[in-house]
Amino acid sequence: MSVNVILLIYVCALVRCIQFWTTNVVDNYVLRFCAKRDTITAGGGESDTLAVLDEDACAQCINYNRDVIVGVKVRLSLDVCNMGKTENEAFRRALAVAERCSVPLMTHHSVSTVPTQKSLDPKATFGCPGDLRAGDIYTHTFHGYPNTIIDVNTGQVHSDVIDARSRGVLFDVGHGAGAMNWTVAELATSQNFFPDMLGSDLHLVNKDGPAYDLPTVMTKFLHLGMPLVDIINSVTSSPAKAYGIETETGSLTKGLSADVTVLKIEECDVMLEDSVGQTRNVRQRIKPIAVWREGEQIKVTVPVLWPNPDSIEKSLRQKSRQEINDDIAAGYEPRVSK
Ligand SMILES: [Zn+2]
């Protein structure tokens, strides 16, 4: 069976973990993954203890597994970094090992002591995305937690975020269970700040909502006014290039893997939720019709229940934890359009 699984590895990853993955997981999958989420951890808060953030071990692991590892990920979040005490050093080591191995670093940056806008915290050692390099990837871009890309006082995208994009830092959706906030996405896209990549970050906790699947994430950005051609690039050629696999897949080019998805745009009239239970009236849906993986046709699936009222109700519990939501944004000028 032909296998092509692509992983990003946490800076703390232990060699034995990746060996488990390559033996027990990679060899049993037929689909191509660009898995960036929670692929390998040491358990608990993976960066709680600096002793496990071993640059040499991580670099060695990457070098042994270049066929399946395409980058490094670090989560900058209090709950996995000993309440913030290890965040700066975890970030420094992640940047260093990514640099040493010439791979991109992906950051998950949500409730962190590392500021989004460095100038707002003069004592800060690092800023994120301010200290990312060209080709690095800032994921979960449209969450509304304290490290949102939006300045909560003005409703504008932080200038460090705009500057990072100018430098070549890439911005991924990484929808997941908690990283898509309609208000944040509307504020950003109304300022012409669209994502470079539309990662779904799909897993058990969001496959029945609020993420559902990749076409649903694409549907949300169609609703937000992202041009269709950009949406298609953001799930094909752009991520392939970002992960350095553009000579294997990512475009309909002679000699590349015959990975093909046929999509159609279907009229609909549903209230589709974000990660915090806020809804928007979506009138067009991107739906898969047929899929081939390396030339072999694969059964197409779509969410059983779309949208899912239970998911909306569950997600609503997150709304009060957001720095930005519809209620807060109603005070901005110009008012957010619905
Ligand atoms: Zn993440």
Image: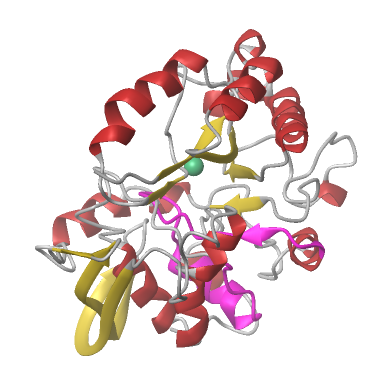
**Rendered residue at 31%/60% (across/down):** 277
Q: Is residue 232 above or below residue 89?
A: below
As drawn, the residue found furthest toward the bottom would be: 267
As drawn, the residue found furthest toward the right would be: 122
**Rendered residue at 48%/63% (across/down):** 325
Question: Is residue 76 visible to the viewer in this orientation of the structure?
Answer: no
In-image side of 218 versus 96 (left or right): left
Q: Is residue 227 above or below residue 314?
A: below
Q: Quadrant of residue 99?
A: top right
* Residue 222: x %, y % from top left: 41, 82
As drawn, the residue found furthest toward the top would be: 51
In-image side of 211 versus 80 (left or right): left
**Rendered residue at 65%/62% (across/down):** 150
**Rendered residue at 21%/80% (across/down):** 270
Question: Is residue 130 visible to the viewer in this orientation of the structure?
Answer: yes
**Magenta-colored segment: predominant secondary structure:** loop
Q: How is the image coloured?
A: secondary structure
Write down the region rendered in magenta.
Answer: 167-196
Q: Is residue 175 magenta?
A: yes
Quarter containing the N terminus = top left
- Taking depth in this image into account, of 286 and 313 the one nearest to the observer is 286
